[in-house]
Amino acid sequence: MSGTKTVGLKIDGQTVQAPEGTIVLKAAELAGISIPHFCYHPAFEAEGNCRMCLVEVEGLPKLELACSTVVKEGMIVRTSTPRILQARKDVLEFLLAEHPLDCPICDKAGECKLQEYYDRHGLFAGRFVEAKEKRDKKVAIGKGLLLDRERCILCTRCVRFLRKVTGTGELGVFERGVRAEIGTYDGVPVGNNYSGNLVDICPVGAITDADFRFKTRAWFLKKGPTVCPRCGRGCAVVVESVSGYPLEEKQRRVFRIRAGENPAVNGWWICDLGRAGRRDIDENRQVRITRKSAPEEKVSREAAIEEIAGRILGIPQAQRGARIAVVLNSLLTCEELALAEKVFAKGLGLPGVYFADPMPGEADGFLLTGERVPNARGVLEAGFSPRLPNLDALAASVEVLLVFGSYLLEHFSEEAISRALAGIPSKFLFSACAGPLDRLADFVFPVALPAEKSGTYINVDGLRQTFGRAVEPPPGVVSEREILGCLANGLGLNRGGPDAC
Amino acid sequence: MSEDAVRLIPADDSSWGLEAYLRRGGYEAARKAVTSMAPQDVIAEVRRAGIRGRGGAGFPAGLKWSFVPQRGTAPRYLCVNADEGEPGTFKDRAILVRNPHQLLEGMIIAAFGVGIGKAFIYVRGEYDRIAGRLGEAVAEARAQGFLGREVFGTEFGLDVVVHFGAGAYICGEETALLESIEGRRGQPRLKPPFPAVVGLFRSPTVINNVETLANIPSIIGRGADWFLARGLPKDGGTRIFSVSGAVRRPGLYELPVGTPLRTIIETHAGGPPEGVAIKAVVPGGLSAPVLRPDELDVPMDFDSLSRAGSMLGSAGVIVIGDRTPIIEVLKVTARFYARESCGQCTPCRLGTSWIHKIVSRMAEGRGWPADIDLIRDLADGMKGQTLCPMGDAAALPIQALVSKFRGELEQAMSQ
Amino acid sequence: MSYAPSTATLKKIEGMIAPYPERSAALLPILRAIQEESGCVSPEAEAWVAAKLGIRPIQVREVLSFYTMFRRKPAGKTTIQVCWNLSCTLAGAENLIGFLREKLHIGPDGTTPDGRITLETVECLGNCDQAPCLQIDGVDHGPVTRDRAAALIEELEAHE
């Protein structure tokens, strides 16, 4: 941003240039110095209640909060003097005094700020020998979230999130002093589409998700950043999974999806719909190529592709436009769509490539868009005019049908699809999940889900986002890019180009 | 003018009303200010007098008024802190009941000086049964044209609203008071920004104690020099000392700033009862660290008490006799802060509670000497590190008790 | 069962809103008015106030639960609040509290078995030169010597 003044200050002896108005905590980050804190969150104004981020500012007698002190030209800040270390130890000791010794059973272990800072501060011995306050440890506050009031450090991030971000205000602080506690109002549980963020922002294990409770340990999770495919927003997400130990050697499980940070798209948040996408990645997957006529038979990809190519090439070139149909979806990446365009539009000369997508829903006024596909813009950029097929027309003239995804079911009844497909001699289904269409196809090909692919999506605002593979697909399962590449080879379209499979 | 005219609490309880107040020269200073002075000159005179806040913090009132930005179209507010929660303090109550018009007059002058059109008097909820006269005084003043629109027939107007608290010591802290008026939990705000710039309803606001404002008419009417001459050069005027505890004549004593504590206790309040010796004295409300009998010659002014390791605070003098085990004092103190902590920030919420638990155990006879060191450490963890001054208010008196009376506490433990 | 204040209280409440530049600031005085009439502020009253001021019921409860003078459940017909802070303790508040609890048969929940009288301990009432002091339904009494306490008990028991 041109025109913003920068301010020069010294932090722990380092000279730092920061834009006017920056808080000391952020300026320190710029210098690679992380100042511990609980209640501060960049999405909110400074709160100042945890008292963990106190620093020394030369010339001021008391320690000052790094989260609320704005940088001034020539300011000299120290973040690790003995006085500050003692102040931090004081805060930790106070928090730990009433904090339950739950680490062995707490989901937050391994990613808990209290643990992290206590560890950094030398694991000092506790001096609290009184009786701790007894509080409710499993309060269902709504949407599968559980509040443990003994663990809560009253940073109020959750309360502030619901007031300032969702504007729904379901949580409040009741009572005062050490009796103060967080809670909902009777009969008004947390009920918005962003509730999962409460777990992400809770610095300790006070708010946890029943969906994740007791299932694994944070340190086993492999973190895979990617882009959420469940709507057109393209929020940055992190898919967290375990492959192998402590599961079985060949087992893979996705345990949760968390928000990734992207100032240009979703800031720090994702919606609950995106989080729920976790289940799709593991549940009900197609794992092997199945031939309808011989379901037990083991079919190799090369063999299956050869058969498909064979049926396509069996139709004279002049008739391919009328007798071959392809149904794609808008979850394909830009790279896959470009390849599909090369293979089907250019290569086979098909005038219409159809699209069947998840039905749109209601936009929620924040991140969730009405469209429930991640790459509608990519589809247009690839030169397609997406439209649903006419089933009767397909039944009447098509001899080879390739369907990518099972979304036809969202637009037509199973019966209608079944009837239409009955009249089509060769039907090939490429789908990530098992479903009712499987029995109608001659070949069912498993495909990878977006989290298992790399590629580019263009979001609802036209922003291109390229992502890498966040989690390994099931063994033997590949993405549409590889399948189309193989098909291109099989159809003789590729001539050894880079997309060869 | 009679002596009564300048006393903050008239001797005669029946002279609280408007007529009696006018008879002793009431509202003359306000008239002088509003009709013939420039607002900046009002502030200047109060600054010259150097009157320090009489609520507890002791911040110079005139200086505080000068922090309100001169320019700006935002409404401004005056909040009168009549929360009087500091244990051992009962002077503002007497002003509200026996001299409400002097408070109102002080408010008019302050509001005129700073450019304020609306004032809220925040009265602690426990005083609601005795606040009738305050309400009547407001009505009387309005009827006379001293409040409301066109005060003294000028363009200046001042609305006064009486707002009651509901039982929270922390609402005596100025930003918690603002939160409470705004209809929220009394949780102090981060400063900066300061109320003079962002205060009530986010507007520039001045918050003053009842006694502070009740002194303003005299400062304007008789001048800063007069005010200074009544006390000390750097700390002028009188203070109303609330005296209670082990004394023969507990009550309110309006005396010059700088009067020695021993004089207040012995000459005015009659000293301890027969057969009782003084063990300790709380000089400025419970939040002021306790003084030992050999420390009672201290002059009661801000600087002297500060040098003595305590504070003038609300000038609430509580005399503790030698029949009172110090553990009792410690117990009451620790319990008070634990119950009154708003709970917002870590050190106060958890520190006051932890200390209370230790002290309760000590009071039950299950303490050991290491507890004293632990209490001191925990108090250190609260000092200067909390969101609002209540952290210090809790930590300092407790530290003083366990330090100055360590011997007695340890001895009790060994029994 | 929904809540509605009496006509008189409603009028009072409506008058309380105007002096504040923001409606929601009238919350404390309104809660006091409701409690004065009904003895406490019930969940139904919370909902009523919230609607009146354009805030959420949870915000009403946050405030109610913060301040000690507000009640969410009814107390005895008569409330005695005894100060146990320093000056009053020095003057024998602990004994006074014990005496009252015994003579009035106050149970562990702070109320008499017939629910008529509630006894609570409170912090400094600002009446320290009259120590030990207490408030009965908000009215100050002090110094409450043993004789005075006995007399007060008699008065309370006389009023059925």
Image (tube, rainbow, N blue to C red):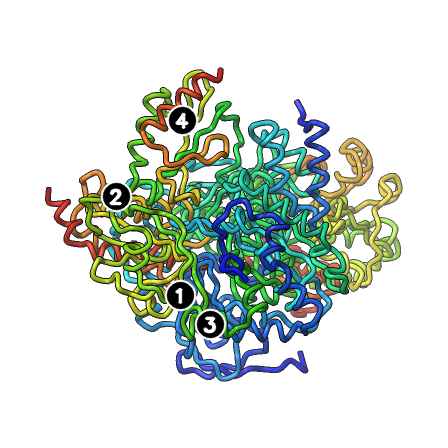
Q: Dot 4: within a 10 Å radius of its alpha carbon, few (fewer than 14), some, or many (20 or more) residues? A: some
The residue sitting at 25% across, 51% down in the picture is: A127
The residue pinned by badge 4 equals C110
Q: Chain of mark 1?
A: B
- Please report contact status of discs 2 and 3: CB closer than 8 Å, yes or no: no
Q: Amino acid at mark 3?
A: Leu
Q: Position of residue B169 (x, y in %)?
A: 46, 48
Which element carries disc 2, helix, strand or loop?
A: helix
Q: Amino acid at mark 4?
A: Gly
Q: Chain of mark 2?
A: B
- Please report contact status of discs 4 and 3: CB closer than 8 Å, yes or no: no
Give the spatial CA distance, label 2 vs label 3: 40 Å
Work out whether mark 1 precedes mark 3 in sequence or the reverse, and give the earlier one.
3
Which element carries disc 4, helix, strand or loop?
A: loop
Give the spatial CA distance, label 1 vs label 2: 31 Å
The residue pinned by badge 2 equals B328
Q: Amino acid at mark 2?
A: Glu
Q: Amino acid at mark 1?
A: Val
Mark 4 vs mark 3, foreground winner is: 3
The residue pinned by badge 1 equals B257
Give the spatial CA distance, label 2 vs label 4: 23 Å
Q: Chain of mark 3?
A: B
Marks 1, 2 in one chain: yes
The residue sitting at 65% across, 41% down in the picture is: C56
Which element carries disc 3, helix, strand or loop?
A: helix
